[in-house]
Image: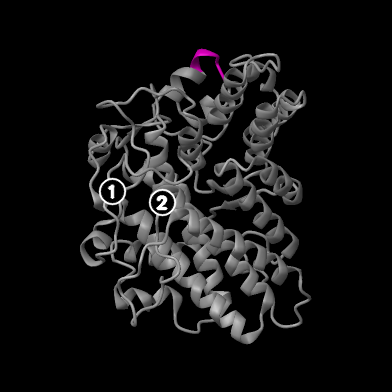
Amino acid sequence: MIVAFVAISVSSCKKSFLKEELNNDPSSLANADPKVLLPTAISNMAYFYGGDFARIDAMLTQQTTGAGNQWFAMQNYDFVNSDFDNCWNSTYVTTLNSLKKMGDYSKEKKLYHYEGVSKVLSAFAFSVVVDHWGDAPFTEAFKAPENFQPKYDAGSAVYSSIITLLNDAEILLAKTDEGRVPGAEDLLFAGDMESWINFSHAIKARLYLHKKEFTLAQSELVLANGIDVKFNFSSPGSGPMNQFDDQRTGDLEYKNSYLYNEMNSIKDLRLYNYVDTASGRLGDWLNTASQPVYFISAMEQKFIEAEILARSGDINASKVLTEAVAISYTNIFNDSTGTANALTAYPYNNADPLANRLKSVMMQKYFAMFFQPESFADWRRTDIPNLTPNSGTAIPRRYLYPNDEKTTNPNTPSVTLYSPRVFWDN
């Protein structure tokens, strides 16, 4: 089933969501049953979040290096607009378009849980768009055929709308729904509405962290209950990095990146699951058909908590940081052995100045968040790690709008890879 969904998203990813044929995308048929649209949206989001987004972001944060084909040019920041077509169109065309139809259908039929789930996933997808592009169509999105040229809403306004979506979703998900409810087609939680509510709170914790509203972020972390939102690809499908490494061998190099050299210097055991040091190819952690793609993890939430505590000087920051690193080891080895060794690099000391405390937390998070797009946000928020540009004097801090948007919608903002920054990147 997953292979079929992903095939749909890949076949359509080079088209513009402004065009009429994609507002009637065959992967999200008008008035189609949520049981069809929900797994489509989930699997497509997982495939591209753990694939194209992860690869570009890992290269920009020097967790990997571009070596062949277009990746060699991108390594030196020679991007063109079409390099971002897959990411933009997969998010808008297949994921958000499917969720819009699912939400409208569910609202009409009073299917509260499906509607709530559609709002949570839409909020996540829109947050990914804002975090990479900034301003984006929201209030006028998906209005075709009446409007093929939607305005771009300010990223900060979209963030506010995302939080409203999540608040509304939590009310719907908490209702007693006596109609049809999600089940096996819910590829994340198999219809467990409490987990969807926790996911909503976890998204808000991440958004508030980006906005530097740390008290609100901490409150949402408590309500998230350390939820792991993870999609495992399975046979006969293939994880996006496994598929990429098999089909595009040599396009990316995994040895001798900044992350590789830093982790290798302390013999951090996770590195040797990230990278096959003998071949230089991707290691077993991601180069597997059952690759895990985390939308947001319990580990990430622990790191968010550690950062907030470190910022305030709370003496519990060191304990929480240790817990976060232990989760990282357990995810890979089913054992936290190695945590103590990992913490010897950039050790945490509550008596240190704030800059040093943050460096300890964020470097450990950088090591743990291998090929997870949130690392790009973390680097822009904190400028940790202190990376040297591969070319020129600066590292890109945003994505370009895709070529179809640039050529068909006059409302598309004029941007470079460096400016304007996403609203929270200051």
Q: Within 10 angstroms of label 2, few (less than 14), some, or many (20 or more) residues?
A: many
Element under disc 1:
loop
Magenta highlight on residue 59: no
Residue 77 visible, this orientation: yes
Percent coordinates x, y for residue 18 in the rendering: 31, 71
Nearest the viewer among 164 and 385 is 164
- Prevailing SS of the magenta stretch: loop
Magenta highlight on residue 266: yes
Tell whether 35 sits left or right of 51: right
Q: Which mark is on residue 47?
A: none
Q: Earlier in the sequence, mark 2 or mark 1?
A: 2
Percent coordinates x, y for residue 340 in the rendering: 69, 18
Q: Are marks 2 and 1 in contact (CB under 8 Å)?
A: yes
Q: Which mark is on residue 415?
A: 1
Marks 2 and 1, how far apart in space?
A: 10 Å
Percent coordinates x, y for residue 33 in the rendering: 55, 81
What is the magenta range? Answer: 264-268
Compared with 144, 377 (above or below) is: above
Q: Within 10 angstroms of label 1, few (less than 14), some, or many (20 or more) residues?
A: some
Label 1 sits on what residue type? Val
Nearest the viewer among 84 and 289 is 84
In which quadrant will I find the C terminus?
Answer: top left
Label 2 sits on what residue type? Gly
Tell whether 423 sits left or right of 340: left
Q: Residue at x 25, y 51 (%)?
A: 81
The residue that disc 2 covers is: 134
